[in-house]
Image (cartoon, rainbow, N blue to C red):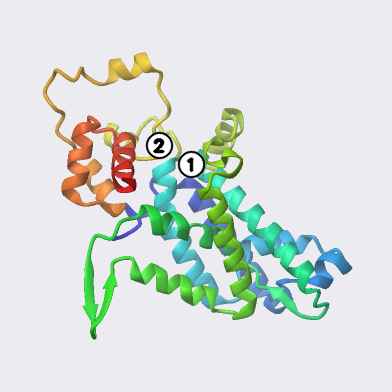
Amino acid sequence: MNGGPSGFTNAPVTRAFIITSALFTIFFGIQGRFSTLGLSYQDIFGKLRLWKLIISIFSFSSTPELMFGLYLLYYFRVFERQIGSNKYSVFIVFSILTSLLLEVLAVALLKDPTANLVTPGPYGLIFASFLPFFFDIPVSTRFRVFSFLFSDKSFIYLAGLQLLLSSWKRSILPGMCGILAGSLYRLNVFYIRKAKFPEMISSFFSRILLPSMGSPRAPSSARNVVGNLPSYPARQMERNYPAPMQAAVEPTEDSITTLVSMGFDRNSARQALVQARNDVNVATNILLEAQSH
């Protein structure tokens, strides 16, 4: 199991976030200011260093945390491909803001004026992503090592555990806040899972920061990848796809590979693509709905 096709194909938001996080971490690392990062009661309620709230969203506090964190963010790009860049951006904003609010509340309750209680980094987003990883990504293979049973998802869990315990209490707190934020998103609080950014905003950022979104030169098989296909009216859908009475469309190898890379069984992926007439978006929904039953 892997995160999908190599690189950031159909995952421009993930790419932008990873680059930003890496640049912030490198900048503070070069200046030797890792020790000054983190959130404390004094920073938030005493000296009002609100800039630390922004820094805590992106910058990790050590090189090992950066490596594990960016690896997990890179893997979780599969969710952007599943739900699309617009909805994934909503997921990012909701996870970060909710976990940050929970962290501030925890710092306020603990009221320790001297200790940095929260380590910096996008822990909220990373650990919120473990909720859809646990519920929506199926296990495709299982194996044993010294009588211990593992699956192809085990390494992701081990990487998350390493990151969670990297700074002990300082990293456990934001990790737990991220899991709570992911739970609220999954519970569809305030119907957040249906929320999308206005088309004007998404178009602006796709032109300025994410030029790979909606590229007109992409082949038809690439345009059908999850998260890269715009919403079509019903009549246009009828024009694009033949009537059910016609012969079944043979799924392309690229479409099958895309679904298999998300963790689905190859035969199931092929059957879903046949049913969806080679529409990867529709096929993904079919497979996810089948898992929920």
Q: Looking at the image, is 226 positioned above or below residue 180?
A: above
Tag 1: Cα neighbours inside 10 Å, few (<14), some, or many (≥20)? many
Q: Amino acid at mark 1?
A: Ser
Instruction: Using residue 53 as the reference point, say whether residue 6 is left or right of it.
Output: left
The one nearer the camera, 196 or 132, is 132
The residue wearing badge 2 is 228
Determine the residue positioned at 45% across, 38% down.
Answer: 213
> What is the x, y in percent for residue 86?
52, 39
Instruction: Tell me if 91 is positioned left or right of 247 in this view.
Output: right
- Find disc 1 in the rendering and name its residue: 85
**Which quadrant holds the C terminus?**
top left
Characterize the local packing of mark 2: few (<14), some (14-19) or many (20 or more) Cα atoms within 10 angstroms. many
Q: Earlier in the sequence, mark 1 or mark 2?
A: 1
Q: Nearer the viewer, residue 282 or 32?
A: 282
Task: Give the residue displayed 23% in from the left and 48% down from the top.
Answer: 257
Determine if residue 10 is in view: no
Q: Is residue 98 visible?
A: yes
Residue 24 lies, in percent from the top left, at 63, 63
Q: Residue furthest front?
A: 293
- Residue 246 versus residue 192: which sits nearer the camera? 192
Furthest residue to the bottom? Answer: 146
Q: Is disc 1 in contact with disc 2, using a CB cutoff of under 8 Å?
A: yes
| Residue 25 in picture, x, y percent from top left | 61, 68
On the image, which quarter does residue 225 sit in? top left
Q: Residue at x 59, y 53 (%)?
A: 95
> Is 9 placed above or below 118 here?
above
Most extreme residue toward the left, as rendered? Answer: 247
